Image: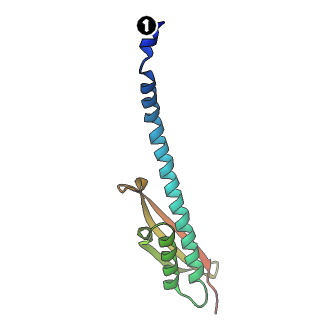
């Protein structure tokens, strides 16, 4: 019994390391997916809010872009609000405003290669 016990010494450390080799990349992957989804949902909400604001009768595309930029800056970071475009379109004869936000989410927030995101918010433009 003493001989067998001696053979098992240190096996817990090896088991712990083997489990960590699988668990750590999995957890980091889940964190990355959560970060990308959070930024995407925040950008989509900001684009929709900017489109609604730009579509009101007393505001224009520049005001919608400013609102979108402010929303993104307040919620995540200003670096995600670098590429915002506001266009007037028509869908089924109805005038619309579309706000598009393009951003790159870096890997784990540390830089390096990232995920490209493009979201668009639409709103029916008010008639005067």
What residue lies at 52% left-to-right and 74% top-to-bottom?
A: 71
| Circle 1 residues within 10 Å: few <14, some 14–19, many ≥20 | few
In the rendering, at what x and y percent does residue 111 appear?
36, 57
x, y (%) of residue 87?
Answer: 51, 79
Asked if residue 90 can be seen in this view, the reply is no
Which residue does the image show at 42% across and 12% down from the upper left? 6
- When the figure is inspected, residue 95 is found, relative to residue 41, above or below; the finding is below
> Which residue lies under the disc numbered 1?
3
Instruction: Between residue 10 and residue 112, name the one nearer to us.
Output: 10
Q: Is residue 103 left or right of residue 98?
A: left
Relative to residue 45, is residue 111 depicted above or below? above
Residue 48 lies in quadrant: bottom right
Q: How is the image coloured?
A: rainbow
Q: Is residue 38 above or below residue 59?
A: above
Q: Nearer the viewer, residue 43 or 6?
A: 6
Considering the numbered disc 1 on the image, is that residue within a helix, a strand or a loop?
Answer: helix
Q: What x and y, as percent, mark residue 62?
A: 48, 84
């Amino acid at each position: 019994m003493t001989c067998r016990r001696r053979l098992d010494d240190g096996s817990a450390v090896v088991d712990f390391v083997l489990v960590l080799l699988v668990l750590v990349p999995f957890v980091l992957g889940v964190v990355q997916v959560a970060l990308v989804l959070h930024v995407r949902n925040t950008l989509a909400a900001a684009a929709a809010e900017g489109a609604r604001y730009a579509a009101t009768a007393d505001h224009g595309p520049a005001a919608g872009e400013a609102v979108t930029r402010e929303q993104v800056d307040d919620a995540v970071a200003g670096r995600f609000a670098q590429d915002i475009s506001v266009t007037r379109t028509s869908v089924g004869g109805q005038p619309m405003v579309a706000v598009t936000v393009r951003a790159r989410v870096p890997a784990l927030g540390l830089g390096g290669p990232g995920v490209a995101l493009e979201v668009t918010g639409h709103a029916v433009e008010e008639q005067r």
